[in-house]
Image (tube, rainbow, N blue to C red):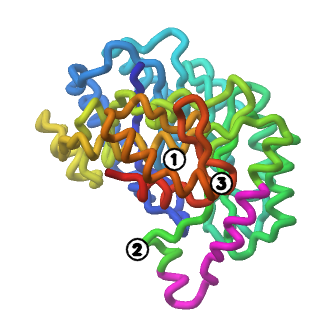
Amino acid sequence: MAGIYIHIPFCKSACHYCNFHFSTSLHYKNELLAALLKESRLQQSFPGMESVSSLYFGGGTPSLLENEEVNQLIVEIRTHYNLLPDAEITLEANPDDLTEQKLQAWKSAGINRLSIGVQSFFEEDLRWMNRAHTSSQATEGLELALRYFDNITIDLIYGTPGLTDEKWQQNVAKAIALGIPHLSCYALTVEPKTPLDKLIRNEQYENVDPDQQSSQFLQLMHWLEEAGYEHYEISNFAVPGKRSRHNSSYWKQQPYLGLGPSAHSFYGNERQWNIANNNTYIKALQEDCIPFEKEILTPAQQANEYIMTSLRTMEGLHLQRMNEAQQKQLEKGAAKYLNSGLLLFREDHLILTREGKLLADGIAADLFF
């Protein structure tokens, strides 16, 4: 099954930590949406799109769109692609955009899953991140959204300098108490050239503490396991039946098509990505041209991508996906991690242990061909 991702590159304000492609100006919104609609038509022949099981509105902040604009994009996809009747259709939203009218309109348009960027339930943390919403808007928005949607995920960030273990526990406990069925939890990463990076380099903000992040990740895994959540991917936890179908397609290396500036697409051994510039994207589509770059993955690159993505999942790396020589090399490389308790071997799968998940990227990189 394939997935379609639509990138909406607009935000009310710039979060200090964010390095995604977005603009805080809505000046060219109409032109960009027209370009998106045209790209969706031009990309109909993208391979692997025979059946589309998920549609994901990301960004940016898709909840900034008018209700009729969201509906128009969904109608466009249904018209030009085989979007399955039971497809998962997710829209990312900020808590301050959640109104009864919008929630009703989204549900009527076919949205059946919301991804809400909460990040924290504490006012001081939200100000530190330069988030657009308040703590009360986070709580009130979720309570309202739960009246209309039973498939909701929220983002939470841990490992920020001001986040004590007590506050982190309260954040997680509140999400559990509200009955949120899916959580995406990320350690704060200081990306180059972001406002946060500059603030830390200028000694206006304290830098992150890797030991604190590791400790809070271990606590998170313990709390959510006790609450009945599956830790099905390094950063993602879900009650049974509420895994993200769309994001799972990435980790399983299924085909996906990305529409919009900066959006990525993947099929087999091919990857392509659109230019991350709104005006250039708009002008190119006005001339019926999709401005993208493309790469063909070598067999070693394909194998390494599988190692990286599969180790992040609870099912782990299936050795039978590799040829005989690759299996032998993986078994040799994994031996030290099996002996140290960072990996375990179960039914032809290499799976990270709880402690191994703290070193997931490093272990994967060490196993690369």
Which mark is drawn over residue 362?
Answer: none
Q: Quadrant of residue 16?
A: bottom right
Q: Is residue 1 left or right of residue 354?
A: left
Q: Position of residue 269 (x, y in %)?
A: 24, 35
Which mark is drawn over residue 341?
Answer: 3
Q: Residue at 74% x, 33% y: name it.
A: 181
Cβ–Cβ under 8 Å for marks 1 and 3: no
Viewer-nearest residue: 313 or 5 = 313
Q: Residue at 51% x, 9% y: name it.
A: 85
Mark 2 packing: few (<14 Cα in 10 Å), some, or many (20+)? few
Residue 276 appears in view? yes
Element type at mark 3: loop
In this rendering, the answer to whether 118 lies above or below 254 is below
Q: Residue at 27% x, 54% y: name it.
A: 277
Q: Quadrant of residue 130?
A: bottom right
Element type at mark 1: loop
Disc 2 versus disc 3: distance between alpha carbons? 37 Å
Q: Mark 1, mark 2: which one is toward the viewer?
A: 2
- Determine which residue is flagged by label 2: 193
Q: Earlier in the sequence, mark 1 or mark 2?
A: 1
Cβ–Cβ under 8 Å for marks 2 and 3: no
- Determine which residue is flagged by label 1: 61
Q: Residue at 61% x, 83% y: name it.
A: 205
In this rendering, the answer to whether 363 lies above or below 44 is below
In this rendering, the answer to whether 335 lies above or below 57 is below
Element type at mark 2: loop
Disc 1 versus disc 3: distance between alpha carbons? 41 Å
Q: Which residues are magenta?
A: 198-219
Q: Mark 1, mark 3: which one is toward the viewer?
A: 3
Disc 1 versus disc 2: distance between alpha carbons? 21 Å
Q: Is residue 180 magenta?
A: no
Q: Earlier in the sequence, mark 2 or mark 3?
A: 2
